[in-house]
Image: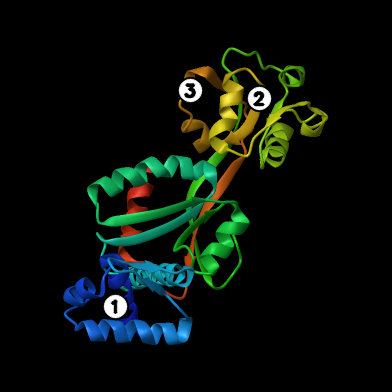
Amino acid sequence: MLNPQWLRTFVMLSREGTFTRAAECLDLTQAAVSQHVQRLEAQLGPLLIRRPRRVELTPAGDALLIYCAELLAADQRLHQRLSAKDDEHGEISLISPGSIGLALYPHILDWQQVYPGLSVRHRFAPDSEVLSAVLENRFELGLVTLRPDDRRLRVSLFAEEPLELVAPAGAGVNDWSDLERLGFMDHPDGQAMAGRLLSRYFPDAPGVGSLSVSGYTNQITLILESVARGIGFTVIPRYARLAFARPEAIQVIESGARVVDTLWLLHRAEWALSARAERLLEHLRQNIL
């Protein structure tokens, strides 16, 4: 373990450029600054090139400076996590599928404008990645569509989200032949979602696998752009459709049959949620549900 005081001295020296200025900033003697650097170099090798006007970092010195920055960031994260009762400062981390993420993000930004001391780290990911991220404590909150059975997790109902058949505005979609004519705009969950919904809408049809594929994208924000331009139809969760910027260019094809996904909220069961996470969830539920 490297001495924290030596590291602080090294960071200040790299910032100020001379032993004299570093010593003044740290309220140390120049000899003490030199001694700290020498002790680091005894363990790590040459860290500085001593120039007449300013020191220059060696590659090892650059690596040590990055290490010091990582230590500082880790220290800040630790203090944020230990300040769980503070609901107006610190970090909240949320990982969710893309569709619900598109719907949540504007409300998260609204909330951060009210509480500028809060930082929200939000990642879009499939169910499997959400589950592992929460279990490994890389994210405090997670949303999934399949309810997990793991004693380490506390699971609660967050929202319901219907699947929707979306076609270009003005396109006539009355039977299976109309879908064949349009072609299917596929995405990572497209075949599974379309299979579930279309089997309800058209129970006697041969299935989504028989349809021609008009395109594919893994960017959830771009799926409906293709549909809006008349390049096929798709099946997508409602929140993704609601987030689309040009609703006038698409239409939802309704039917009596519905397929609804349940969104489950996850967090580790062994410890309570931070007050700031509880407050964010309350805000999101009021605006999403």
Q: Image height check: is 113 above or below 201?
A: below
**Mark closest to the chain's N terminus, 2 or 1:** 1
Label 2, residues with CA under 10 Å away: few <14, some 14-19, many ≥20:
many
Q: CA distance from mark 2 to mark 1?
A: 62 Å
Indicate the amino acid at tag 2.
Phe
Q: Residue at x 48, y 68 (%)?
A: 59
Of all residues, the one furthest to the front in this rendering is 52
Mark sitting on residue 9: 1
Mark 3 or 1: the one toward you: 1
On the image, the x and y values in percent for residue 276 come to: 31, 61
Left or right relative to 22: residue 192 = right
Spatial CA distance of label 3 from label 1 is 58 Å
Vertical order, 229 against 113 (above or below): above
Q: Is residue 73 left or right of residue 270?
A: left
Q: Is residue 281 left or right of residue 249?
A: left
Mark 1, other Cα within 10 Å: few <14 / some 14–19 / many ≥20: many
Residue 233 is marked as 2
State the CA–CA distance, disc 2 to disc 3. Answer: 14 Å
Residue placed under numbered mark 3 in the picture: 247
* Callout 2: SS: loop
* Residue 169 falls in image quadrant: top right
The residue at 70%/39% (across/down) is 196
Is residue 201 at all visible to an observer of this figure? no
